[in-house]
């Protein structure tokens, strides 16, 4: 029972923690309009894609946005001397550091005033594989055939929403778009100043882009909406696991009751001897209750120890998965 509810609660905390790690008060703007027309949700192709100009206009016109981070994504080969590997390239601006709550280990992040420059910031795994134990700051590498100077090194972050952020190279957004011959952005991430203004700000951003594109061709996802949906789904899952566990506990209780009934029936001679010695019925009842209570407490303690061992095992096998004890 404890292990089942523990796993359900651990799944809920893991998923909500993953979304919380995206940042706070986050708006995610996706090109195309998500539509549901009686079937599976589909993203329609809009008349225009999201552009850098859209991001700049939102940053200037929407006062409730504290930061706006345009994001371009592609894959390329990174090479340093005789070492090389394929990596994910994220083209963005300095705002991404605060929007996604990323941390630097050393050096500096992309400067705010150079959206198009041959510079890069390396993820922890990329730096380790390209430079070993050497300091990569100031060194030059090739990313997609373009020579770049390393100006920073990201702190280890691990996997977040399906992407290993330690295997990423950050470059200025215009540099990435030129490298991959892109005219549109992959996403626009925006941080709202206060959580109370998220819905109103999302609607204002949608109207501004609609006016610029002459069409409602963007989908704006609020972090809170996604988080609450997953939280409610996984909360229901935890309740379902708890209900299953409660049924098994009820069945086990009936089994214990039957075993106790058999035990009493098989000890009638012992009960008769106690009564012959002058023991009252209340005292006989007390003997059996104390005995059953002691056995139940020992069994419960062993069950909790097994549940604890199970959660320790799960944590050892899946360190990112939080399996918590709930009694």
Image: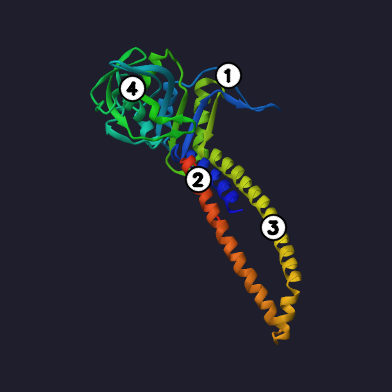
Residue 118 drawn above or below residue 61: above
Q: CA distance from mark 3 to mark 1?
A: 57 Å
* Mark with earlier residue (2, 3): 3
Q: Quadrant of the C terminus?
A: bottom right
Is 70 located above or below residue 290 in the figure?
Answer: above
Alpha carbon distance from label 1 to label 4: 28 Å
Check disc 2 and report its element: helix, strand or loop. Answer: helix
Mark 2 neighbour class, 10 Å CA radius: few under 14, some 14 to 19, many 20 or more: few
Q: If you read the primary sequence from the N terminus, does the residue marked by circle 1 or circle 4 appear first?
A: 1
x, y percentage for residue 54?
Answer: 45, 24
**N-term mark: 3 or 4:** 4
- The spot of residue 147 in percent (x, y) is 29, 15
For residue 313, the mark is 2
Q: Are marks 3 and 4 in contact (CB under 8 Å)?
A: no
Q: What residue is at 51 percent from the left and 26 percent from the top?
A: 30
Closest to the camera, between mark 3 and mark 4, is: 3
Could you say whether the residue bearing mark 4 is in a helix, strand or loop? loop
Left-right relation of 281 to 2: right
At which x and y percent is residue 165?
A: 41, 30
- Badge 4 local density, few (<14 within 10 Å), some, or many (20+)? some
Residue bearing the label numbered 1: 45
Q: Which residue is mark 4?
A: 115
Marks 3/4: CA–CA distance: 66 Å
Q: Residue furthest left?
A: 138
Q: Which-is-in-front pick, marks 2 and 1?
A: 2
């Amino acid at each position: 029972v404890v292990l089942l509810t523990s796993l359900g609660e651990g799944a809920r905390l893991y998923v909500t923690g993953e979304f919380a790690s995206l940042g706070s008060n986050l708006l995610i703007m996706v090109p195309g309009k998500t539509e549901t027309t009686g079937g599976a949700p589909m993203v329609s192709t809009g008349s225009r894609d999201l552009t850098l100009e859209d991001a700049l206009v939102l940053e200037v016109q929407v006062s409730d946005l504290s930061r706006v981070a345009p994001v371009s994504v592609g894959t390329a080969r990174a090479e340093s001397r005789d070492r090389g590997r394929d990596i994910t390239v994220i083209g963005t601006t300095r705002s991404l550091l605060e929007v996604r709550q990323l941390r630097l280990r050393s050096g500096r992040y992309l400067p705010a005033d150079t959206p198009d420059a041959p510079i890069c910031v390396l993820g922890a795994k990329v730096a380790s594989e390209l430079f070993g134990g050497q300091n990569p700051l100031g060194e030059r590498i090739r990313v997609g055939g373009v020579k770049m100077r390393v100006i920073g090194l990201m702190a280890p972050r691990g996997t977040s929403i399906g992407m290993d952020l330690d295997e990423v190279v950050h470059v200025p957004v215009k540099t990435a778009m030129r490298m991959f011959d892109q005219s549109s952005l992959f996403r626009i991430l925006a941080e709202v100043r206060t959580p109370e203004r998220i819905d109103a700000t999302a609607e204002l951003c949608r109207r501004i882009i609609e006016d610029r594109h002459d069409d409602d061709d963007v989908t704006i996802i609020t972090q809170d909406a996604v988080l609450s949906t997953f939280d409610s789904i996984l909360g229901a899952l935890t309740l379902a696991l708890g209900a299953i566990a409660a049924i098994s506990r009820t069945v086990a209780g009936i089994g214990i009751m039957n075993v106790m009934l058999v035990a009493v029936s098989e000890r009638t001679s012992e009960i008769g001897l106690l009564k012959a010695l002058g023991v009252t019925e209340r005292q006989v009842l007390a003997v059996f209750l104390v005995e059953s209570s002691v056995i139940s407490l020992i069994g419960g303690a062993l069950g909790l120890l097994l549940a604890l061992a199970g959660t320790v095992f799960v944590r050892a096998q899946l360190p990112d998965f939080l399996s918590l004890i709930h009694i």
